[in-house]
Amino acid sequence: MTVGLTPYQLRFCPASYLHEAHLPSSWARVPEILPEWRTLPASNGALLEALTLGTGYEMPAMLGGVALFPQGELVQLLRRLGAVLHGEAIRHCLLAPALRQVITLLGEEGHRAVLSQLDLLIGPWPAGWQQPLPTQLEEASLEVAGLQFWLAAGEGEPDWARRLALRLAPASLGPSWRLTTDQLPLARALCLKIAKQVTPQCCHLLK
């Protein structure tokens, strides 16, 4: 079983989960010079300061545990959520290159699952939740979209949200979701439903 993060690691040890693309410019050569940089205690204090990551945040009660997921499962979950939120656009995608790219990202089984479950997940989709595919679909576009929705549903503090974002490869900022208070229960239910389908082995972290 793949091991995720502990709450302590998430709070105090950014070197253990930071995607290298988010390293400060002054650290550009560190992975080359110090291949063991992720395991050095000094790296954590230096990165907390360089990235101005506060440590006094509270984890969101319902959805905060996603930040502790193992890396592969985190990406898989947010990518599927992002795909579902573009499900109508994927369903009607007629451009072969774009469709091939979507299938490459999701896998054939994941692509079929998105299309078959789209109308069943939460009933009628609230206005604005379904988004068009970006003109240029980057490798990380779907998980970044999933992240934006998860953050909106989770209502987490900025220092928690930044840590979650730092675990993912950067991508052009896509859609954002402004959820009303009465939409939050449905949004959270959607996040949890996708998690149970895609990463059931990690759902204990969301309780």
Image (cartoon, grey):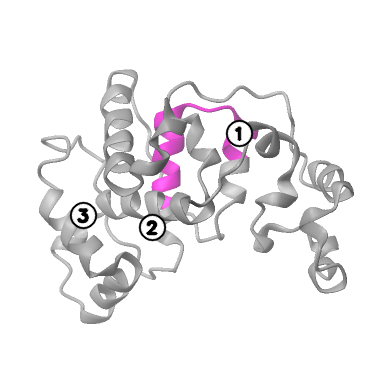
Identify the residue at horizontal 38%, vertical 43% (top origin).
201
* N-term mark: 3 or 1: 3
Task: Name the foreground residue: 198 vs 127.
Answer: 198
Position of residue 137 in the picture relative to residue 162 (left or right): left
Please rate how many residues cluster around mark 1, counting C-alpha atoms within 10 Å: few if below 14, some from 14 to 19, many from 20: many
Task: Name the foreground residue: 194 vs 98.
Answer: 194
Position of residue 187 in the picture relative to residue 27 (left or right): left
Q: Position of residue 93 (x, y in %)?
A: 18, 68
Disc 3/disc 1 C-alpha distance (Å): 28 Å
Q: Name the residue under label 3.
A: 87
Question: Is 185 a magenta residue?
Answer: no
Q: Mark 2 points at which residue?
A: 142
The correct choice, above or below, for 188 with respect to 23 in the image is: above
Identify the residue at horizontal 85%, vertical 42% (top origin).
45
Residue situated furthest front in the rendering:
1
Q: Where is residue 38 in the image (x, y as percent from the top left)?
A: 77, 56
Magenta residues, as a range? 145-162
**Residue kind at label 3, given as amino acid type:** Gly
Q: Which disc is residue 30 wearing?
A: none
Q: Which disc is residue 160 wearing?
A: 1
Q: Quadrant of residue 95?
A: bottom left
Mark 3 element type: helix
Q: Quadrant of residue 106?
A: bottom left
The correct choice, above or below, for 81 with respect to 113 in the image is: above
